[in-house]
Image (tube, helix red, strand yellow):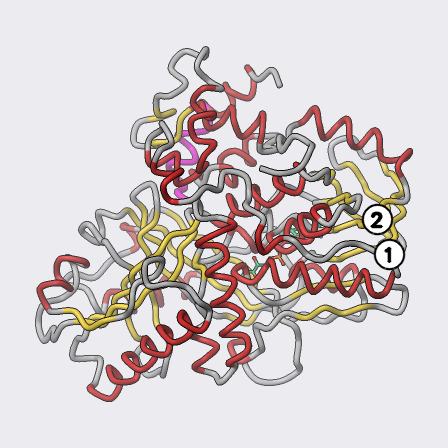
Amino acid sequence: MSGTHSSSLNAARRARELAGLPGESPVDVLVIGGGVTGTGVALDAASRGLSVVLAEKHDLAFGTSRWSSKLVHGGLRYLASGSVGIAHESAVERGILLSRTAPHLVRPLPQLVPLLPGVSGPAAALVRAGFAAGDLLRLSARTSHHSLPRSRRVTRAEVQRLAPTVRAEGLRGGLLGWDGQLTDDARLVVALARTAAAHGARVLTRCAAEDVTGGGAVLRDRLTGQATQVDARMVVNATGVWAGGLAPGVSLRPSRGTHLVLPRSAFGDLATGLMTPVPGERNRFVFALPADERRVYVGLTDEETGGEIPDVPRASDSEIGFLLETISTALRAPLTRRDVLGTYAGLRPLLDSGSGRSADVSREHAVLTAPDGLVTVVGGKLTTYRRMAEDALDAALARSGVVAGPCRTRRLPLVGAGNRAELAGVAAPDRLVRRYGTEAAAVLDGAAREEGATEPIADGIPVTRAELLFGLRHEGALDESDLVDRRTRIGLSTADRERALPAVTETLGRIRV
Ligand SMILES: Cc1cc2nc3c(=O)[nH]c(=O)nc-3n(C[C@H](O)[C@H](O)[C@H](O)COP(=O)(O)OP(=O)(O)OC[C@H]3O[C@@H](n4cnc5c(N)ncnc54)[C@H](O)[C@@H]3O)c2cc1C
């Protein structure tokens, strides 16, 4: 990892950096929001040599960034709507994440469309054409088929091997395409924040920005209530669906997307993403994605929302019913609510273009500069965070007249990144390498003196005390929720969350940072 600072984030560093703020004003860049966009901006700015403060009201990845499908898209969906530029940009960013910046957190995921009677010949031809276009996109982005294999037709027997619970009657085989999948979205955000910290960024969680202008903001420490004025040469508002509350001219039209969390056993040993067309809709699928910890995520809905923006959105009963019903059309036996371990919902930060249903609003990102110089970056998606950050910072630099070097993030590995050979050589279980990359051995070493630290914290929950300690010492976790809901994703299962809490609380009590 480059940079002269430590990448470790913890309560002691936070307190020290907060206390030092008054003496350091003005900073070059104040970034507001600790999701994928804000941490991306902080890394971009810090790696160009600028002094950076990032303020996050709650915790890293508290907002939309932890509620995604955890896919690193090649942009096929955008191609389908004729947005060739966005599709290409997405495919390029996918390649960067897969091969350079985060190969430890991103891997190829096969996605299968079983050809069942509900998929007509013309509909299958359309999917085939889409996958072929996806291959072209991959080629245009110079991502080799060693990183992401070509799409292909698969036999009926292969479908049954990859997705054992798919219904057999009328099955004619399947179509298989490939995309990128994150181990976890919140872990990408934490890796970005820590890499920014390694370049000197001050990453301050539990700090809400108030009275925001293009020249600074008041940061309120939510742990003590203390307020500190921070002046900045550039201020970037990266608060996602909350952006309109800080920048009055910005209008968003959030739409809710819901996922269900099921045990892998409910799908046999599902080895691929499973895509089921939504009856009566063209080019819309409900998918089941195999994830770590033997879980499957089933998504996705697109529901317009209005009114107050909740801190944590909730899935509606009808969304749960719709997802179960639609995915079950491809299965031998229908799934029921009893199979569901948990649900999660996020709000897409879509710009209000004033027309159409929410699903038609552009996913392209926007950088908006207010008359006072406040730069707001909004829209886009997780996959394109790096490009969004680059565009936002370039706009802020142009407006402020501050001189800095060119963007470096295209070639900047995040903490834990390594090439496939380096990752294969890490002396730690696979499960940890997929979450911590080259740091996996350090996660274990750091807890070597703690008795039982490498044992699961509860029956059936593979997370170890070593990971909790690493979260507190190096990943900026401050309380139980940071650990169960973001550094680990135990909390995605309601029952697991309850069972894990005693061990988490006990670890917090023991911690000496
Ligand atoms: C259901 C769903 C599925 C998705 N799936 C994918 C996918 O598979 N792949 C993909 O590429 N993209 C996906 N996306 C899109 C992607 O998740 C979002 O575009 C992205 O996470 C937005 O990140 P952000 O940092 O802009 O916003 P957020 O993650 O919401 O971050 C904003 C942060 O600002 C903080 N904040 C708010 N107000 C203040 C304040 N006053 N002071 C300080 N901090 C503040 C919040 O606490 C929050 O942490 C999905 C989106 C949804 C909703």
Numbered disc total: 2
The secondary structure making up most of the magenta span is helix
User: Which residue type carries mark 2?
Assistant: Asp
Q: Is residue 494 magenta?
A: yes
Q: Which mark, by number, is residue 9?
A: none
Q: Name the image quarter holding residue 414.
A: top right
Query: Does residue 342 sit above or below 92 in this rendering?
Result: above
Contact, mark 2 vs mark 1 (Cβ under 8 Å): yes
Residue 308 image position (x, y, % from top left): 67, 61
Is 242 inside the magenta-drawn segment? no
- The kind of residue on which mark 1 rests is Val
Quarter of the image for residue 287 reads bottom left
Residue stretch in magenta: 492-503
In the image, the residue with mark 2 has its CB under 8 Å from the nearest atom of ligand 1: no
Left or right placement of residue 279 versus residue 205 in this view? left
Q: Which mark is residue 28?
A: 2
> x and y percent of residue 472 in the render?
57, 27
- Graded by Cα atoms within 10 Å as few (under 14), some (14 to 19) or many (20 or more), the crowding at tag 2 reads many
Q: Quadrant of ligand 1?
A: bottom right
Q: Residues within 10 Å of mark 1 (few under 14, many from 20)?
A: few
Please identify the quadrant where the C terminus is shown: top right
Name the N-terminal-most of marks 2 and 1.
2
For the view shown, which residue lies furthest in the bottom direction?
122
* SS label for mark 1: loop
Looking at the picture, how far across and down is residue 367, in whole percent? 72, 68
> At 37% from the left edge and 44% from the top edge, which residue is drawn?
420
Task: Name the residue tied to disc 1.
Answer: 402
